Amino acid sequence: MHEHDDDIIMALAEGTFEPDVLAPALAEVSECPECATALADQKVALAAMRSAQAPVLDDLERARLHRTMREALGIEAPVVAEPSRHERSYRRLAALGSVAAVLIGVVVVAPYLNLLGGGGADDSAATTTAAAAEERAAIQRADTLADGENSLGAGGDGFETTSEAGGESPELSSTSAPALAPEFRVLQWRGSPLGSEPDLASLARRIRLQGSGLFAPLDDDSAHLSDATANCLAASSPDPEAATVSLIGTVDVEGTAALIVAYVAGDFEEVTVLAIDETTCRVVAKY
Amino acid sequence: MTHRAAQDVDLLQRFLAGDGRAFEELMGAHEDRVFGVCLRMMRDREAALDAVQETFLTVFRKADRYKAEAAFSTWLYRVAVNTCYDMLRRAKRRSADAMPEGLEPADPKAADGYLSAELRPDIETALQAIPVEFRAAIVLVDLEGLALETAADMLGVPVGTVKSRVFRGRRLLAAHLGNPHGTSGHPRVD
């Protein structure tokens, strides 16, 4: 069987030959047992593939994908200038102003509406309740604008971000890129009782999602590392092509501290996450 | 340029100009097909969903590097296939590190994967048994119905290579499926 026969066999199997060349092609193949077998193979495989339905995401999967991507978009969307303190105050005032306007509407206009429409006490109470709800929502909106919506610690997957500098959560608004804040780089396994292992795969996904660029490169922090940690990291050096290496933090795996390191390498700048046993300096997991 | 391709470029430009919603729209237009490719490559839905996420995150981070020389979808699926290759490589490394070959524990998700991949279990098994490069070519050409030229662009290989992979991949599939007409045995992989 020659290589050019492959084209003929594929075309026969796919049914893409013009009628005038179909008969000679079939004749050629029928004279060659190997070609006939190859044609049968092609037809079997094609029929199997054509019987397949296109898979689609189910609702839960789609929701998960969208949530993940929204988080990523919120974290990494193009930089929009943070509102200044003055602007934030103005926005808060504006929000409160709108609440005041609603309240004035309720107090001043509603009685007239009642007079005209004959509404009872229940309607008035309902209106007041709605106004109060709107007030709460408006204040919440103002606070959200002022304080940002997302924090790294809100993932709900067992990890929290702690600040070495203070107790506040990092501010990551949905429209601004995060400022690299080394003091927020420590991730700690939360509530890991004995016998319960941290979900390192989940941690790795999360780091990958956020991008290792969110964390300080190791070089910037090496001065703060203990000698043991620095030696350990040097001993288990990751991919030599890694552009940046970041120490994300430590997790406790069955009583042993493991360093979590992320680095970026490869054509598609793949983020790889390593867990390194701090005692033996051995890579215990790679994601 | 098709209407879809023009829309993709428009959405990408809007995203690069700072419109995050445009990216969501772009994703919505392609997520099912990207998921389909990833599911065929990765076999189980969880891994496929991870691959889809990584694909869109890569596209999100590198959107400014897209050159409109090829359709956006070609670039997107190329990223998806490469992401799957990478994840499969990582999984293989992990399982090789974890224990000696042949002693891997059964994947508890695999049974669900059979059902959820919308392929007959024997076809799914056969597809997973062939080399990943052949699988990618067959997924793009036979399952996604793409032209050989488009698949070649996506895979970053010449058209002849894709054609050869499809041809040989189909023969391997038939051998795994037990072609009732053929006596081909197991065709050569390379």
Image: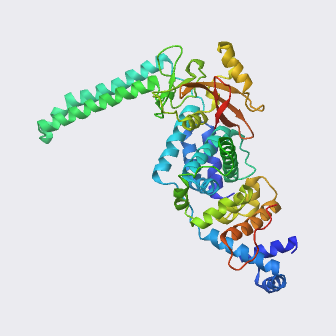
Residue B46, image x, y percentages: 55, 49
Which residue is found at the position 62% from the left and 62% from the top? B125
- Say which of A67 and A194 sits in front: A194
Residue B108, image x, y percentages: 53, 52
- Say which of B22 and B155 sits in front: B155
Give the image quarter of residue A1. bottom right
Taking B133 as reference, is A74 left or right? left
Q: Residue furthest right?
A: A2
Which residue is found at the position 66% from the left and 70% from the top? B177
Quarter of the figure that contains the C terminus of chain B: bottom right
- In the rendered image of this protein, does residue B190 appear above or below residue B48? below
- In the rendered image of this protein, does residue A63 appear above or below residue A236? below
Taking B146 as reference, is A187 left or right? left
Give the image quarter of residue A53. bottom right
- In the rendered image of this protein, does residue B88 appear above or below residue A187? below
Residue B80, image x, y percentages: 66, 49
Residue A59, image x, y percentages: 46, 52
